[in-house]
Amino acid sequence: ANKKISVLVGSLREGSFNKKIATEVMKLASPNLELEIVEIGQLVYYNEDLDQGNPPQEWVQFRNKIKNSDGFLFFTPEYNRGIPAVLKNAIDVASRPYGKNSWAGKPGAVVSVSISALGAFGANHLLRQSMVFVDVPMMQQPEAYIGNAQSLFDEAGTLVEDTKTFLQDFIRAYESWVNKF
Ligand code: FNR
């Protein structure tokens, strides 16, 4: 059966390199993976008080989407050596209310994308740290640190061939990872 994979992108900007790389990966994936970008920018900051009565509708919809996924694919920039607040907020929202963690047990993977040569290594691993606690087993290999993102697309917006090959291998490995669960 096809696997429903929620794609979470940690950048809200229109021209986001993370979004561009996510779109490329979605094109390269086998049809056995149903990849869908799930928006996170509309989620208000997590506040336990809002979880006492009727939580915000956006939270409820997002939690249902996460709960009904077979896995997660994260694309994250690095903000000041951490993950962007909007992505951390999304993780927090779907991990609650207490005892109802919508992430638990589903296989994940992360691609970090940066304009720096370090490829957002810090964000990649801080995301993994939170995933340990919300119980998302993250694919360990291959790792994906995409650096110098501004140089990976030509003037027509086409991704360079070696990065495309790398991402192809990455998404194949992720499909195998998902099929183990
Ligand atoms: C950055 N950027 C950045 N890059 C990096 O490699 N390490 C870092 O710690 C930071 N810190 C940082 C903080 C803030 C507030 C911003 C806005 C940016 C640069 C970052 O890699 C660049 O903006 C990317 O283009 C962001 O990804 P998107 O939006 O293109 O997907």
Image (cartoon, rainbow, N blue to C red):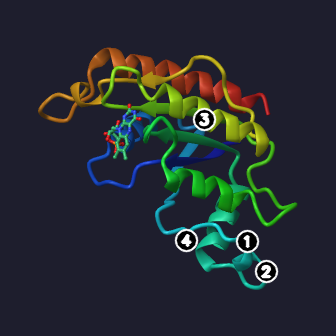
User: Relative to the observer, which residue lies in front, 44 or 177?
Assistant: 44
Q: Kindly check if marks 1 and 2 are in contact, taking CB atoms under 8 A apart as contact.
A: yes
The residue most toward the right is 99
Q: Kindly check if marks 4 and 2 are in contact, taking CB atoms under 8 A apart as contact.
A: no
Callout 4 environment at 10 Å: few (<14), some (14 to 19), or many (20+)? some
Q: Can residue 29 be seen in this view?
A: no
Q: Is residue 94 visible?
A: yes
Residue 146 vs 63, above or below: the answer is above
Q: Position of residue 137 (x, y in %)?
A: 75, 33
The residue most toward the bottom is 53
Q: Position of residue 142 (x, y in %)?
A: 57, 17
Callout 2 environment at 10 Å: few (<14), some (14 to 19), or many (20+)? few
Q: Position of residue 152 (x, y in %)?
A: 26, 25
Residue 128 vs 170, above or below: the answer is below
Residue at label 2? 52
Q: Which mark is residue 126?
A: 3
Q: In which quarter of the image is the C terminus?
A: top right
**Tag 3: amino acid:** Leu
Q: Which mark is residue 44?
A: 4
User: Relative to the observer, which residue lies in front, 22 or 99?
Assistant: 99
Ranked by sequence position, the earlier of labels 4 and 2 is 4
- Residue at 12% of width from left, 32% of height from top? 155
How far is the residue under mark 1 from the one under mark 2?
A: 7 Å
How far is the residue under mark 3 from the one under mark 1?
A: 23 Å
Residue at label 1? 48
Residue 133 vs 61, above or below: the answer is above
**Tag 1: amino acid:** Glu
Ranked by sequence position, the earlier of labels 3 and 1 is 1
Callout 3 environment at 10 Å: few (<14), some (14 to 19), or many (20+)? some
Q: Kindly check if marks 2 and 3 are in contact, taking CB atoms under 8 A apart as contact.
A: no
